[in-house]
Amino acid sequence: MDTEEILASAYTLLNGAVLNYKGEPVGTAAALDDGVVAPNYEECFVRDFVPSALVFLCDGQYDIVRNFLRMVVQLRHQQSVMEGHERALGLMPASFRVPAKDDVNGVPTADFGDLAIGRVAPVDSAMWWIILLRCYVLTTGDIKLAHSPEFQESMRATLDLYLKESFETSPAMLVPDASFMIDRRMGVYGHPLEIQALLYGMLSTAQELLLPLPENERLLSNSKKRLQTLRSYVRIYYWLDSQRLNEIHRFGSEEFGQDVSNHLNIYPETIPDWMDGWLPPNSGYLVGNLGVGRMDFRVFSFGNLLSILFGLTTDEQADQIMNLYTARWPELVGNMPLKISYPAVDGDKWRYTTGSDPKNVPWSYHNGGSWPCLLWAFVGAAVRTGRHDLARKALDQAMEPLCCDQWPEYYDGKAGSLIGRRANVHQTWSAAAVILAHKFLEDPDALAVFESINF
Ligand code: GLC
């Protein structure tokens, strides 16, 4: 199969997934599989639409992205009141459904996680919405949309909610389990890396898109401070390379006062056995989660790659993360890019972190499964760090099998060589990721949508 044929197949899926409302395109369905695993795969998920949207932007199809951005802003008002508990307007839906073609009086309906199987709040949605708005503005020059009162008000509501003072002792953001791409219980409560990367992306964006109006002043200054403290915190405390691992291995604990080396009181005994000898020289990564007395050493790909793309890592750290991928290719990439998390949790640990979730058994789905939808972020990060060789290698090895296997949602197994047991086929973001990755590689200008911002 040649590249053109594979891309044509990916475009057929992407275009076939476009959802219309009142004759206008407003998003893409998550999957076009007739036997989808859950009915909400027919809906447009905010996070899933991001790679689709970036493809549309690169192709000059701006309408669908603008309509989507507008639609999601309006849907915020559908937040249900759960048992008298009224929630803030700053949250955005995980997904929305458009009425069937023949239902002329129907209106789109949103799910804020109350209906989805995992019943989790999609904390990432609003952050993706703001980040996508920036990509839209950068590509189209349509700053008017971002400056409209409705969009300014929406960004304010989100920042208000996300920057709320809570009981935190660090600038990282605290969230419940499964509040982002990993949307089922996986022991990712606390301060997961992906959320911190998105927060950083959102706060940087806010500096650009929020107008200097009196009502925005406090949020502008708070978000500027927070993004600076968050950046230093992540770069120092989430970072793990062999030098840092040595420090942690010899950490003193139970230290009192300000001048301590082990600020978060991490016990060296928590270093998992698999780490012994695992980190090659000149490599490193940002750990998956961090809190007081808790370091989750698992490698979560999306958080690391987004941190590179949004400029949350230093340039040196970005290079070292790509070195880790080079040296640990069989484990982190294997036959199908890309492992969502590494390694899998098993045994009792699997039982109590996932609640014995049969979908998240070891080396499947969120628990060490391989997700082609992450390809765009991998290729983007590789191109940004000048590692075109890695970008090409990952894309070349993925394209043909993905197309022949009909664009599965995820793969199983240590090496990602089995189509996911419960995976949909015709999964839209698997196809969109390949198209976008191909664009990033062939046309480096396409990456400009993620130009990092330095405040
Ligand atoms: C699964 C994924 C989630 C995705 C959704 C739709 O729930 O975990 O990240 O948004 O499917 O594809």
Image: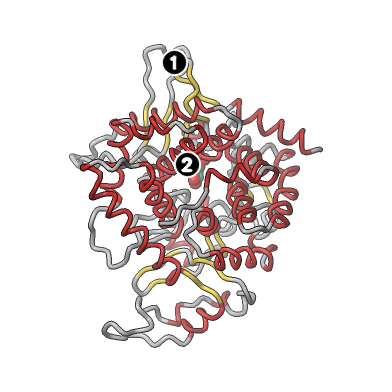
Can the viewer see residue 187 in this picture? yes
Q: Amino acid at mark 2?
A: Arg
**Residue 326 lies in quadrant:** bottom right
Mark 2 surroundings: few (<14), some (14-19) or many (≥20) residues within 10 A: many
Q: Residue at x 27, y 53 (%)?
A: 221
Secondary element type, mark 1: loop
Q: Residue at x 68, y 68 (%)?
A: 327
Q: Residue at x 38, y 61 (%)?
A: 191
Residue picked out by circle 2: 47
Whether 143 is drawn above or below 277: the answer is above
Quadrant for the C terminus in the image: bottom left
Name the residue nearer the viewer: 331 or 264.
264
Residue picked out by circle 1: 22
Residue 245 place in picture, x, y as percent:
51, 79
Whether 275 is drawn above or below 171: the answer is below
Mark 1 surroundings: few (<14), some (14-19) or many (≥20) residues within 10 A: few
Q: Amino acid at mark 1?
A: Lys
Q: Residue furthest left?
A: 84
**Residue 117 lies in quadrant:** top left
Residue 344 place in picture, x, y as percent:
56, 62
Name the residue nearer the viewer: 114 or 78.
78
Q: Residue at x 26, y 47 (%)?
A: 160
Name the residue nearer the viewer: 376 or 277.
376
Lateral position of residue 427 relative to residue 74, left or right: right
**Label 2 to label 1, Cα distance in Å?**
23 Å
Does the beta carbon of the residue at mark 2 sit less than 8 Å from ligand 1? yes
Quadrant for the N terminus in the image: top right
Whether 175 is drawn above or below 290: the answer is above
